[in-house]
Amino acid sequence: MLLAGRGFGKTRAGAEWVRKLATGKYPVRIALVAPTLQDGRAVMVEGDSGLLAISPPWNVPKFEASKRTVSWKNGSVATLFSAEEPERLRGPQHHAAWCDELCVWRHQEAVWNNLLFGLRLGETPQTMITTTPKPTALLKTLIASEGVALTKGSTFDNLANLAPTFASEIVAKYKGTRLGRQELMAEILEDVPGALWNRKALDECRIIAAPDMARIVVAIDPPVSVSDTADECGIVAAGLGDDQRGYVLADASEQGLSPAGWAHKAVALYHSLQADRIVIETNQGGVMAESVIRQVDASVPISAVHATRSKRARAEPVAALYEQLRVKHAGAFPVLEDQMCAFTGARNQAGAKSPDRVDALVWALSNLMLNRQIRPQIRTL
């Protein structure tokens, strides 16, 4: 199975695999399964990286569209099938199959099951799957199956061979977004049941650049300890626009920072954005957390906040702002957004780390947009 982004060369890899099988010592029968017959013909057979184009001049196979077959001189035959017609795979038997863009097949389970029943020729029937991943049940089952050799790749692995405008326009536009991570980086992205945010909604709230800001804050959620395995220090900047919407401007969170390290980083972000205030949670460190920032720059206004409610209770009003379309992301923040889309607020959530980036985000947007709710907890220095 080859999971890769757009432009990686999945079609070329699949076509070369089929050509090698078809031009071997003995003739074989191969199934070519595409989302539609038109896709199969246009991409797998007649495309720029299809079977006809990649074959040497002395052994170009013959394509008969009426029969849906590609035939080689040695007697090998590859037959096109559409994932829209799973019943077509009942009866025919094959030595191998090339399945292209499996994740967009219309009837995935039915097509796959019928295909497997027909893979009964030769000693070791094989299947080559080339697809950009989506979190479908069949794909997840196959990835977890024994006997599946998985190879991954991204658009960036083959960027040098793609049109310059593709890199400058398409890749630049979608890099870091949910769609980009799926279509370019070939990541399998799923929403977590019960999470306060989902990826589709975050993509819809994304903008390229923020408007003028009426107010900007940098929020810090300091870690308890300092080590390579300690929690991250959440450092997130957000602004309140003249339109009264909140805008997430930067995520400078990092793991392994000393108190002096995160203080310097937060203060640097404060100055680079010409922010109005630093907001810092003082549950871990209290006065020390404030004094560390003072040692870096005594002129920085600080609001110290102390959490008295659960993380979910604090995050829910901010998540509601997103639902009301009152918050925008000025750019892509992949790691922060991953944490947001995994955050349920459940205690002892399996495999979950402390949501430090989310905490910093919540403090920043709360300070900007929910002042009435948090004012009793804020002490301005």
Image: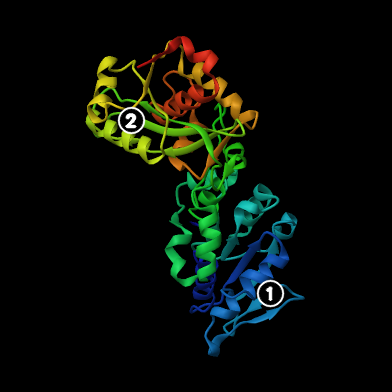
Q: To which residue does mark 1 refer?
A: 69
In the picture as drawn, the residue positioned furthest to the right comes out as: 66
Left or right: where 359 falls relative to 205: left
Q: Residue 173, image x and y in percent?
A: 54, 55
Mark 2: amino acid: Cys
Q: Badge 2, how many Cα within 10 Å: few under 14, some, many 20+?
A: many
Q: Residue 38, how many percent across, how many down?
A: 72, 67
Q: Nearer the viewer, mark 1 or mark 2?
A: 2
| Residue pointed to by mark 2 | 233
Q: How is the image coloured?
A: rainbow
Q: Is residue 129 above or below residue 224?
A: below
Depth check, front residue: 43 or 97: 43
Q: Quadrant of residue 323?
A: top right
- Label 2, secondary structure: give it: strand
Q: Examine the rendered structure and indicate whether residue 53 appears above or below residue 295.
A: below
Label 1 sits on a secondary structure element that is: strand
| In the depicted structure, whether residue 231 falls above or below residue 66 | above
Q: Residue at x 60, y 70 (%)?
A: 29
Mark 1 to mark 2 CA distance (whole Å): 59 Å
Residue that appears at 72% across and 65% down? 37
Rendering coords of residue 220 (x, y %): 37, 27
Q: Which mark is residue 339?
A: none
Q: Residue at x 27, y 26 (%)?
A: 298
Q: Work out whether residue 294 can be spotted.
A: yes
Question: Counting other residues with Cα less than 10 Å from the Cα at mark 1, is it few (<14), some (14-19), or many (20 or more)?
Answer: many
Q: Residue furthest front?
A: 299
Classify residue 184 as left or right of residue 257.
right
Decide which of 146, 269 is in the foreground and name it.
Answer: 269
Amino acid type at mark 1 = Thr
Figure disc tally = 2
Q: Does residue 129 appear in this view? A: no
Expressed as whole percent of the image width and height from the top left, the position of residue 24 reads 49, 78
